[in-house]
Amino acid sequence: MYRIVFRQDLVPNIHLLKIDAPDVARKARPGQFVVIRIDEKGERIPLTIADWDEAEGTVTIVYMEVGTTTCRLALLQAGDYIKDFIGPLGVPTHIEKFGTVVCVAGGFAIATTMPIARAMRQTGNRVISIMGARSKELIFWENELRGVSDELVITTDDGSYGRKGLVTESLKELLESGGVDRVIAIGPSIMMKYCALTTEPFGVKTIVSLNPIMVDGTGMCGCCRVQVGGLTKFVCVDGPDFDGHEVDWDLLFARQRSYLDEEKESLEKWRAGGSCHCQA
Amino acid sequence: MAKLNLNRVRMPRQDPKVRARNFNEVALGYSLEQAQEEASRCIQCKKRSCVAGCPVGVDIPEFIRAVRDGDMAEAVRILKSKNSLPGICGRVCPQETQCEANCALARKDAPIAIGRLERFVADWERANLNTENPVAIPTMPAGKRVAVVGSGPAGLTAAAELARLGHQVTLFEALHTAGGVLTYGIPEFRLPKAIVQGEVDYVTSLGVELKLNAVVGKVITVDELLADGYQAVFLGTGAGLPTFMNIPGENLNGIYSANEFLSRVNLMKAYLFPEYDTPVKVGKRVAVLGGGNVAMDSARCALRLGAEKVYIIYRRSEVEMPARREEVENAKEEGIEFRILTNPKRFIGDGQNSVVAMECYEMELGEPDDSGRRRPVVKEGSEFTVDVDVVVVAIGTTPNPLISSTTEGLSTARWGTLVMADESRGQTVKPAVWAGGDVVTGSATVISAMGAGKAAAADIDAHLKD
C-alpha cells in the first residue's frame, strides 16, 4: 500500500497527488512513468511522473479525470492509500546539451514536461517552454514551468490567457526565427502529432512521449505496441519517448480507442454507484 | 501376487457444456474413497522408476502407500519434504510424460494416477491442516541473505528450499500478485488462484519476505542487490516476452499476445468486468494461433468469456502439438474447433483498425526440422480467409531482457535465454548469480522450473556454506 501524503486540485479536473514511495523516488528520472492500481478490483494504468523528492521519499503524479480509474483517483485524499504504485518504468528522456530546446506542453502534460525542461536547463540548454490549454482556468504550474525555462510562452485556444491560438503556431514562429536544436512535445496525442508535423519541414528532431493503453508496463503483454519507423515497438520498455517524425500516429489513435465501449460501460456503472463527483 | 487392477479411477469433472461457460475448476478432484481406491492399485514395486521420472524426486510410492493406508498427514509430510508446491504440480504437471510414464502399470495403459493423488493430498492438507502453524523452521545463525527474483514456480521453489536451509530470503515479484505464470497465465479453471495463493502463503510462512511491485532490472538492478548485501541472487524470471507472427496487420485492434489476453483475464479478472475495471474484447469468432498449453488456455478462456466460435489455428498436425493430451481433449470436448496444418498469412482490418478476418495458408509436413518434428511447408496458392474479430497469438514467449540488459556480466543466447556456466546447478556465468526455469530453458513446464529452482537452491546453499 502506498500512502497519499498530499493532494491538490490544480484545475477542476486535473489533480496532483504526492505519494510516499521511496523506492520509486530514488530511481525516478525525467520522462519515466509509474503504473498504478487503486485497489483489488482496479485496472493498471500508466501515469507519467511529474516530480519526485528522493530525500522525502515521495513521487508526484498529475492526472486528468478521463476514465473510471482517474475519476476514482480524484476522490482520494491525503492519508488514503493506493494499492499498487510501480516504477519508475520506461526509458528516461534523453538529456544532453543540444543548444536551444523547445518544450511544448499541452493540458495535464504541463506537469510531465517540467522535470524534463528542468533537466535540459541544468545540462546547459537554453530552454523555451510553450504551454497550452483550452482556456485560462485550465492553466496550472505556470510558475513551476517558468522557473525552469529561459522563456515561457502561454497559449489558450480561446485567448482568455496568454496568446490566443494553438501551441503549434507559437512553435512554428520559433522554428522560423531559427536556432532551435531540439523539440520535446508532450500532451494529448493529437497535439503531439501536429507538433511533429510542424517541426518536420524544419528538420528539427522532435521527441514525443506516447501514452497508449498498458497492462503490466514491463514488456510482458504488448498491449502498448506502436509502430515507429516501420517497426513495432513496446512503449513501456522501448519508450515512452520516440522520434515524433517516425511515429504511426493513426495506429496509435486507433489503438487508444480499443476499449471505448468498455470504458464507457465501466464509467457509467461506477457513476450509477453514486460516488462520482465529476461532470458527466 | 494379487491380480493387477487396471482400472484407473476416473477424475470427476464438470460437464463440458456447463464448464465451457464458467471459470470454475474443470477437474473436481478425488474423494477420499476414490483416492484410496486409486492408491491401492499401486503395486509398491521395488524399482521406484516413477521417482526417477519426477524432476524434484518426490517419494511417490511412499506417499501413495500413506494415502492407501488413510494416513493423510503422513502423505502430506512425505510429499512436501520434496515438493513445496504439490497443489500446483498435482494440477498442471505433465505426469503422463514423467512419473506416470515410468509407472510399472504404464505398459498396461493403466499407470497409477500419481498427479491426481498428489492433488488430492495437497487439497486434503489445505482443507484439514492448520497452515497458520506450519512446520517449524530452525533459524540458523549461519543463514545468508539471498534474493530470489520472480515468484513463479522456479522462484517459489528456490525461495522455499533456501528458507528451509536456514537462509534469509527476499522474493521479488514485478507484478502486484505473486505466482508468475501460475497467476497471470494459467486460468482459474485449470489452476484456481486460491490454490496458488495458498502455496505462496506457505512459502512466506517459512520466513520468506515477499516484495511485490519490485521490477528487478528497472526499479533495482541485480548488481544493486549484490551491493545491498545479498550474497546470492537467483533469477527465476521466466519467459515473459511475447512473440508475434510479424505478418501484416498484426497491430490491428482485437489482436492480442497470449500474455496480454491471459493477463487481462487471469491476473486482472477481466472475466468479471465491469465488476473489475479491466476489460477484454469478447470476440464472437476467436482464432488462437499456436498448439501449446497456452494456446489451449487462451481458446478455453475465449469460449468461457462467451465467444460463439473458437478456433485453434496450428501449422503442424495434431500429433506435433506441444500441449498436454488432456488439455487438447478438454478443449475439444468443450467445442473448440481445431484447424490444423493452417498458418496465417496476414490479418485484415475493417478500415477502422479492427481485425475482421485472417488470410491463411494450408500447410503440409515436409522433412523433420531441428525440433525433430516434420517441418510445416506452405501449400502455394492455398490461401483462404477466416472471419475473426479477436485473435490471440500464442506461438511462444522468450525471456524478458529487462534483467539481462541491465546486469553486468550476464549473457544471453539466441532466444534471449541466459548462458549458463553449469545448468545442472543453476550457475550463470556471473559470480553469485544463479538462474533456473524458463529464463534458462525457454518455455517449458512448471515442474522443470521447480526442479531447476531446487537444484540451484542446493548449489547456492553449498556455496554460501563455504
Image (cartoon, helix red, strand yellow):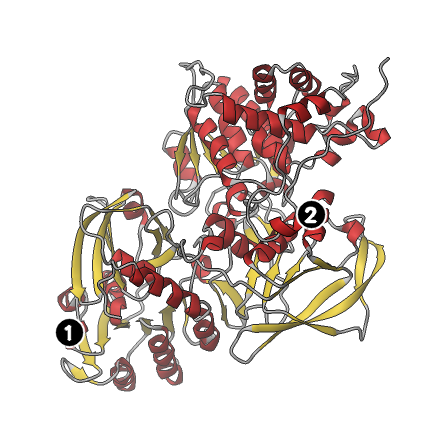
- Which residue lies under the disc numbered 2? B330
Vertical side of A238 occupied by A170: above or below: below
Amino acid type for the residue under numbered disc 1: Glu
Amino acid type for the residue under numbered disc 2: Asn
Q: Residue at x 59, y 66 (%)?
A: B284
Whether labels 1 and 2 share one chain? no
The front one of A256 and B221 is A256
Vertical side of B30 occupied by B376: above or below: below
Name which quarter of the figure residue A100 lies in: bottom left
Q: Give the SS element for disc 2.
A: helix
The answer, for residue B422, to whether it is visible in the render is no
Vertical side of A65 occupied by B223: above or below: above
In the displayed structure, does residue A68 sit left or right of residue B354? left
The chain carrying label 1 is A
Q: Residue at x 46, y 51 (%)?
A: B269
Q: Give the SS element for disc 1.
A: helix
- Which residue lies under the disc numbered 1? A137
Q: Residue at x 55, y 35 (%)?
A: B154
How busy is the neighbourhood of tag 2: few (under 14 within 10 Å), some, or many (20 plus)? Answer: some
Name which quarter of the figure residue B46 lies in: top right
Mark 1 vs 2: CB contact within 8 A: no
The answer, for residue B124, to whether it is visible in the render is yes
In the displayed structure, does residue A280 sit left or right of residue B163? left
